[in-house]
Each structure stands twice: as structure tokens, then as C-alpha cells.
Image (cartoon, rainbow, N blue to C red):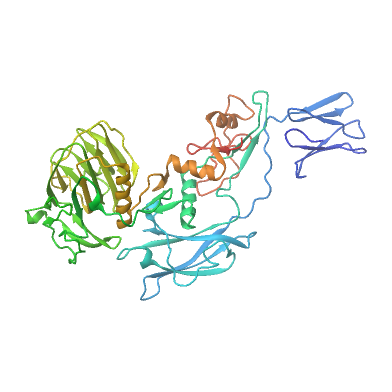
Amino acid sequence: KLTPDGLVLLSGHNTSQFQVREMDGSWLKSISVNGFSHAPMAAHPKGGFFVFHEITKLRRWQNTYRVLRPKTAKEMPLPEVISVTQPQGTNHVSVTYRIHDADSPQVSAALLGFVDGGNDLHKVIVPETFVGSVTGQLDDNVSTGQTHTVTWNAEADWKVGYGEMAMEILAKDDRNLLNLHFLTLPASDNNASTLQISRSPITESDLLDLWYWLVASGDSEVAFSNGIVHQPETAGAQTFAPASLPNLKLWLDATDLDGNGQADSLVQDTPVSIWVDKAGGDHNATQSNEAKYPVHKANSRNGKPSVFFDNSNDGLATSLNLSSPFTVAVVFNSASSSGSRRALQGSSNWLIGPYQGRVKYYSAGSWISTGVPQVANRYYLAIASNSGSESTFWIDGFDYTTDSTRLGTPGTLHLGASGHQTSNTLNGHVAEVFAFDAAISAENRTNLSKYLAEKWDLAYAPTPYASGSASTTAGKAYLLNRMNLREASAAEVTRAKEASTPGIINQFTPSFQVGPDERPVKVNEHGFDTGATSGFWVVPVSQ
């Protein structure tokens, strides 16, 4: 007989034993009966079964919580990096590795680099240029148990003078992105339907590993730029020219400090006393005090120069006075991730910049945006807009406005430690600045953002999925949808935690834990993770 909750009940003549098996035939339990030459039994419509244990006794086995035994799990592919070397006289990196997998002769493999050995998306470099073929070594047909060597042309993909890099091989077999263990909770008197739910919660660390794989494998459904995983965007129009934008009042371009339309040929650390306005309004950024000159830095970003403002007093003042409405865009970074700093500021207390560890926008006595955590040396594209009725602030294409009601204006526009607060130094680079005496249209803002992102190798991510080590709401939703999962509701999690003891959550120390975080910490009587303090459980979408 077959029970509603998936048990196979076996009995027969000339045997006093009754067997309970899984649907696949796996043995679960044998029950001996007395006084019969066979073992009469019957399935209960709500799960469980009856057995005539003796001539005058009927026994019932009730399944209050059902945990299906998983089939023997496949072996996980385990990459082993054997050596990482830099061939003498080159800017190449050779990586020798093998992938161990006892039951998969071939797996998918990919390569990532982590600047300074970091472990977040801001540290990731995706190797794309190789010396020789990587077919059968970094694709979907990589043989396991064999030694492979690939040589990466680091100079082509990592545009720095020098640096340290940790290399990591990633591997995946034919399973889904996450190998989750699901438990099944049967219907009961209090719950009319079964519940399938992940045994343990998914954490940010789990999601980060998924982003690493999608980025490394070049998955076409996501894009990766400047430390951000995001929804792919179409490229900017090749014919776009910033000078054609209406209401342009200021344009400072670090590749053309003299504003003559030609790339500069300056030596490193050339002092900058004047940065010519390419918008044609003669609102040049100037500094009369030699001690406060910023300097020209060659090959700062994407092979292009920038202007460096030090940690002491460097600053420039324009002659542009901005009142409402306006739009200001700036590309900048800072070597410091703490302290009160300004990339742009006004003669009034108005600022855009890295302030107290975050990229922020301040005006009229309050923060219009508290922005995002600032990563030292990372370049940001920030755009502030004031329409006269509301303020908006975008970072790398995404709207981070937290208070649109503040309508303060810059007054005269300054760079670095010049303007309202001269003690707020930048200690970083400015690559380009635009200012308009209008709240430019969404189309023009998008075109300008794409132009700057492509020119300076920045992220343009109006739909970001993940940044640093954290996933956005949109990113989490994307991954779950891709795996045909949804986040379990609070009621579903409570039901799984309480299991067969409504109102009580048991917490036992498990006999088996999985590293590196040694999960689960505590489990209930059916192995469900009741000790987790972070993460979220998932259930199939079809449930």
C-alpha cells in the first residue's frame, strides 16, 4: 500500500514482519506483529498507518513531521590552485590548478582575481585576456583530476602600475546554483497542505558566492563593472557629445585641462593652477595660492589622467554661481574612507563627496542622500539635481535620494578644500565635472551617465544586484527567481521551527555540521536549523 505522505507499506503471507520503505524502495523500518501469519495494515488518509499488532490490538503510527531521506549526494567539485607565478619579464600571471570531483568527469570552471587578496566584489578583477587558448581549461568542459595551466595577460585587464593579486579557480557541476537540502512538512490537522522548506537559511555569504560564479563565468544575464553586479544596459550612443546637452554651464575634463579639445601631454605631478571650462562660459576652476595647487596625475583611471587634491589644502574655485534649478555631475575618488571630505562644495554649506565613510549629498542643513558606503580609491559617478520643487541624487546610475524636500543651492561651485569648508579635504582624484542650470531630462542624464561610465570605466547600474559583499533587494529577487525559489514567509518558518511541538522550538546540538561557518548551530528534532540568527529560508515557487 502507498500512504498519502509517500510511504510504501509492505506485508505478505507467512511473515510476521511489516516493512516501511521510501518511494524509491529504501528501507525505513520493520515492525513485528504477534498472533498473525501475516501483518494486516492500512494507510491513514492524513498520513501514517494502522497495523493489527495483536489479535486484539490495533496500533497507529502517526507522522507529525516527515523528513525524506535524500539520495546519496553528488561529490562537490573542489578546485585546487597548485601554483601562481609571474613569468619573468612579463606582466602575465600563470595559474596551475586541478579540480577534484569523484563522480563528474567534466565540470565548468572559471577564474577570478582578488586585488590585495580581498573578499568582496570591489576587489574582483575578471580575467578576460589570455596568452593562448583556454578551451577545455576555463569553460563548461574542464576535465577533473587533471592538471591545467592558463596564462592571464594581467596588464590588459588590470590597468595599474603594480599591485598584489590573489587568484581563485571556481568550479561547478551540473547541479543548480545552490545545492540546497529541503525538508518536507506533511499536512496536519492545523495545516491542510505540505510544506517544503530549506533546512538552513541562505546567507549573504551564500549569495556572494553565486555572484562570484556568475561574474567569473561571464553569464549573459548579469553585467559587472567597478565592483557592482547589475542588470545589463545598452551601450551609450557613439555619436553622443556632452557639448550638445542643453543648459550646459560648466565642463571640466581632466584629459583636457587647457580646454583646447586635444588630449594633454603633461608630466606627472604638474601643478594645476587653472582648469579650463570646456562649456565656453569661461567659468574656469582656478587657484592663486601655489601651496594649494592640485596636481595632474597621469594614467589614473582607465588609462586617462585626473586631477589630485591632497589631504592638506588643495582646492579650486570656479566663477559659476548655481541657483535653482540645477544639475551637477562629478567623477571622483578618495584614498580615505573616513573623515569629513568634499569632492565638490559650494560657497554655501552644500557638498557632494565622501563624508564620514559614505558617498553623500548635503544641502540646506540636511542630507538629501546618505548614499552608500565609500570604498577607498574606488571611483564614483555622482549626479545631484534640483528641479526647484524636489532634489534627487544618483550614484552610478541608481537613485539614492533619502530626502527630496531639501532644496538648497551651491552658490559658487568649488572643488576639494575650497569653498564653504576649507578643512574638508578630498585626498583623492577628480576626473570630470559637469554643471547645468536646469534639472536635465532623464534621457540626457542617462546619456551623460553612460558617456562617463564608458570613458572612465565606471559602473552605470540603474538596477544594481550586488555591491561589495551585499545583495540588493532586486539582486536577491533575481537569484531566487532564477532558481525557481521564493523567500519563505514568517508563518512558514515558524511552522518548520516548531515542527511536531507547536508553540515550542527545540534546539539541539547537531551531530553533523558544515564549514566554514559550522552550520547549523542548533537543530530541532527533525534537523531543521533553529539556531540561525541571520539569513532567510526559501521554498519552491510552485508551493
Q: Nearer the viewer, residue 410 or 156?
A: 410
Horizontal side of residue 181 vs 357, given as left or right:
right
Please state if 24 lies on the left or on the right of 378 as rendered: right
Residue 386 lies, with reference to residue 162, above or below; the image says above
In the rendering, at what x and y percent does residue 270 appear?
15, 63
- As drawn, the residue found furthest toward the left would be 288
- Look at 54% across and 38% down and name the residue there: 486
The answer to whether 510 is drawn above or below residue 379 in the figure is above
- Position of 526 with respect to 23 (left or right) is left
Relative image position of residue 362 (x, y in whole percent): 23, 38
Query: Looking at the image, is 430 positioned above or below residue 191?
Result: below
Q: Position of residue 249 (x, y in %)?
A: 17, 47
Quarter of the image where the C terminus is located: top right
Residue 244 horizontal side relative to residue 399, left or right = left
Vertical placement of residue 28 versus 430, above or below:
above
Which corner quadrant holds the N terminus? top right
Residue drawn where x is 26% and y is 30% of the image: 405
Snapshot quadrant of residue 98: bottom right
Report whether residue 335 is seen: no
The residue lying toward the viewer, choosing from 227 and 493, is 227
